Every structure is written in C-alpha cells, then in structure tokens.
Image (cartoon, rainbow, N blue to C red):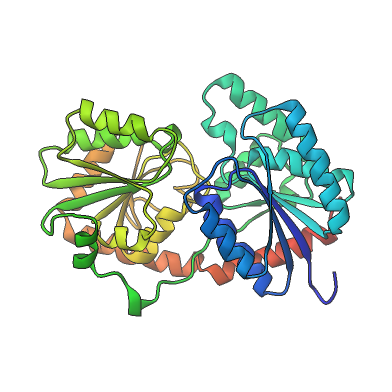
Amino acid sequence: MTNGRLSIAHVTEAFAGGVITYMTLMLSQLKAHGHDVTLFCSDGRRDPRFDEAVDAMSRSGVAVRTLPMRRSFAPWADAREAIRLRREFKNGRYDLVHTHGTKAGLIGRLAARLVGVPAVHTPHCYAFLRAGTRAQALLIRLAERAMTANTAGLIAVCPSEMGIAVTHGLIDPRRCTVISNGLPDIDTAVVPDRTRARQTFGLSPSAWVVTMAARLVDYKGIGLFLEIAKRCRDMNVVFVLAGHGEREAWVREQVDRLGLADHVRVVGHVRDVPSLLAASDICVLCSVAEGQPYILLEAMRGGCAIVATDGPGIADMLEDGKTALLTRRDAGELALAIRRLAGDELLRTHLVARARERFLEAHQLGRQVDALTKAYEMFRENRS
C-alpha cells in the first residue's frame, strides 16, 4: 500500500441478486477512489446480469477472475478452491481480502489466513437464518464460528446482521462495524414516466399494481406473495412478480393451479427496475430474512410505497407507519396492509415522502464508499 492506496481482493460465490448489485456498484467506486481491486467470483450461478456486470467492472479497471466454486458443501472441491485462492492471494500481494456470503466466506478467510493477509467478511444475511432444516442451520453456524479467529473484522450491512453475529459468538463486537448499502440518487431529469412504464409492461392505467421483484427462491416468500394475491382477488389489483430463479416453473404452475392467471403476472428478469417501480403503486417484499435488500432501496429512492415483513434486515431500514407498512410473515396481515394503502392516499403519500428522506439520510452511495474505505484501513491496521 502506498499513499493510502489498498490492494483488495473480493471473493464471492453468490454472484447473483443483491450481491451482484453490491459488487457492481462498490468495486467500481473503490477503483475510482484509487484502490487496486480484484474480484474472485463463481460463475456457477449465472444471474442474467452476470456478463453485463463483469463487463462493467472490467471497463472500470476492476480485475475479474472466475472460479468453479460450488454453492453446496463439497469438501474436496472446496479444499481445491482454498488452495487455489491461497496461491492467488500470495501472488497478488493483497493488503486485504473481503469475503462475501457463506461459502466464499469460509474458503476465502481460510486462504487469507494461510498467507497472512487480514480478511474482513460481509454475510449479506447469514445463510443459517434461512436454512431448510435445523441441522443445516446448526452446521452453518458451527462453520461460521470456526472462522472467527480468521476474521479481522465483520462489515455488516445492517445492525441486525451485527447483532446476530455477536449473539451467536461469530465475532468480537469490537471487531464489527455496520455500513448500510447505498445507491446513487436518481436523476430527476430521467425519472421514468408512469404512463409509459405501464405501457411497457402491458399494465392497465386504472389498475392498482402491486409488485415484488426478487429471486424466485423459497426464502423470498414467493408462495406467500401468491397467497396475498389470492386474498386480494376482489380488488382491481394486478400482482407483478419479477425475477428469475430455481422456482420459476413452480411459480407459474401455482398461478394456474390457484386460478390467479387474471391477477398475477410473472414477468421474469426485469432489467429496468426503476421503470417497473414507476409502473407500480406498492412494492412488496415478504422474505424470511434479508441483509439489506436493494429492491427496497430502489423503492425508497423512486417513490414507491412499501409493504414488507418485519424480519431481520428489513426492520433496520424501515419503520412501520412512518416509512412503510411492516407486518409479520402472514398473508392475511400483508393483504390488509395492501388494502389499507390502496384506500388511504394521505398515508401513502406520507410513507413515500418519509422513505425518500430516509434514503437521502442513510443510503447514499458516496456515504457507503467512504465508510467502507475507512473500515478497510481500520481493520488492516488493528488486525489481531
């Protein structure tokens, strides 16, 4: 490192969903701030934005290297990847390694320890919070705990994430910091036009539009979203489910089975999220747990009212009755919240305005970049 310039290796297996947004935004910004940045990522789970994101980062000067890292635990394959990363870290002479997510967090922190490079970790929502069984959750927690000695610092994206880490003995609280996710503010000169946006997505000008944009996986609550739509069939409401994932075929089958074809649109991956939100009246998210979801930041920034579950990650960024309507993960409660917003324009306007203020206060991209740079310097200097 010279003149405050760091050489940083980022490692992730989950190059999809919110993580791909985080990487595309943050790594290019870190490079623009004068740091040398390399991303080691898996190409096993190909988000539709994968090639576009890699191209964008490469054009900004970020070095991108793909690894055949697997999502599931595979001891021999994982050992090979740890050995390969150890060699890469040694040859690259990095000042710091930043790992993201469970699998890369385990392999990357171990490889960094083997070459004496300090490693910081961001969970982006601990995997044990959304594990399919208690046994899986316990195994993941034990693996995370085993990495405590190999972690110079934890960079949580929300207070809940830090609290969970401390509660489960995954990190010393003195080695934690919280850095909220951010987005660049929307350019008011190019705010998507609502009428044109509705025409683009084939939506009626008069219907209420309730949208959930998420990866189509179980922990995002896709089944719950369909149940909400079923409970609101008496309203002039179109429910839009945007995203891709392993459960897309199941979702389409459920829409037909539940008789929701006239009420639910499954539109697949949407590149222009601001236009989708401009066409929508309410943005819904009903996940089991989150880190700090970008779709809600997009809604806060763009002026779309929010109804969401009050689980970890979501309740950190939104306040019930002030910036959003938050409920338990219950279809009846979520449906009632949607009905309430549909019938109360004053409340809807209030929530949208306060959410926008909250975005400007806490979720500007520049604030996130500055905080991350300071955290890197602190953890590198104070590593144990």
Residue depicted at x 79% and y 45%: 85
User: Does any portion of residue 370 appear in the rendered image?
Assistant: no
Residue depicted at x 47% and y 50%: 48
Query: How far across and how far down the image is residue 374, in percent?
Result: 71, 66
Image quarter of residue 367? bottom right
Compared with 297, 186 (above or below) is: below
**Which residue lies most toward the bottom here?**
189
Query: How far across and how far down the image is residue 355, in percent?
Result: 37, 62
Residue depicted at x 58% and y 53%: 157
Query: How far across and how far down the image is residue 253, in percent?
Result: 28, 28
Compared with 224, 185 (above or below) is: below
Image quarter of residue 101? top right
Specify whether 104 is left or right of 377. left
Specify whether 85 is left or right of 184. right
Specify whether 46 is left or right of 303. right
User: Does any portion of residue 88 appear in the rendered image?
Assistant: yes
The front one of 50 and 15 is 50
The front one of 62 and 144 is 62
The quadrant of the picture occupied by the N terminus is: bottom right
The front one of 169 and 2 is 2
Compared with 164, 272 (above or below) is: below
Specify whether 255 is left or right of 187. left
The front one of 213 and 345 is 213
Query: How far across and how far down the image is residue 298, in percent?
Result: 40, 60
